[in-house]
Amino acid sequence: MLRDVIDVAYHKVVKTIPLEKREELSDKMIDALLVSKNEDKMPVGLANTILYSWQRGLLVGDVGLVALLEAAVLLEPERTMEILGVELQLTNTTKKVKEVLMKAEK
C-alpha cells in the first residue's frame, strides 16, 4: 500500500519537471546510480523497470523518470537533492520530493 502511494507521489513529482530538463536530469541520476556504493538498496523490480526503460529509450519519459528518481532517492538521497535543487535548479521538484520522503517516513 505504501509503495503504491509513493509511486503515485513520484508520478506527480515527475510532472513538475520541465521537458527541456528531463534528459539532463536522467543522465545525472544515471551517473549517480552507477557510482553509488549502496546498490544493495535497489529493489529488483525497480532495477528491472529502469533497464526496461533504458532498452526502449524511455528514461526521459514519465515511467523512466519515476523509476530513476525513486532509485536515486533510495540509493543517494543527498546527491539526488543536490542534482535537483542546485545543479538543475528545480526548486519545486526538490520540494515535492522532500514531501514524498516525509510521507514515506510516517
Image: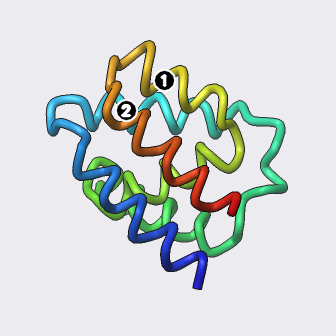
At 60% from the left edge and 51% from the top edge, which residue is drawn?
102
Say what secondary structure mark 2 lies in.
helix
Q: Is mark 1 on a helix, strand or loop?
A: helix
Quick one: 81 or 96, which is closer to the camera?
A: 96
Q: Are marks 1 and 2 in contact (CB under 8 Å)?
A: yes
Residue 47 relative to residue 94: left or right: right
> In the depicted view, which residue is nearer to us: 43 or 7?
7
Question: Which residue in the rendered view is the most extreme toward the bottom?
Answer: 1
Residue at the left extreme of this rendering: 19
Q: Mark 2 points at which residue?
A: 25
In the rendering, at what x and y percent does residue 50 appear? 50, 60
**Residue 98 percent coordinates (x, y):** 52, 41
Q: Which of 96 and 65 is in front in this view?
A: 96
- Say which quadrant the N terminus sits in: bottom right
Q: Say if 94 sits above or below 96 in the image.
A: above
Looking at the rendered image, the quarter that the C terminus falls into is bottom right
- State the image quarter where residue 23 is shown: top left
- Residue extending farthest to the top is 86
Residue at the (69%, 71%) spot, across then down: 44
User: To which quarter of the image does residue 64 belong?
Assistant: bottom left
Q: Which residue is drawn at 71% across and 67% down?
A: 43
Residue 30, percent across and down?
Answer: 52, 38
Type of amino acid under label 1: Ile
Pointer 1: residues within 10 angstroms few (<14), some, or many (20+)? some
- In the rendered structure, find residue 83 and report the number of the disc placed on it: 1
The tag on residue 56 is: none
Badge 2, how many Cα within 10 Å: few under 14, some, many 20+? many
The picture places residue 62, in percent across and down from the top left corner, at 28, 59
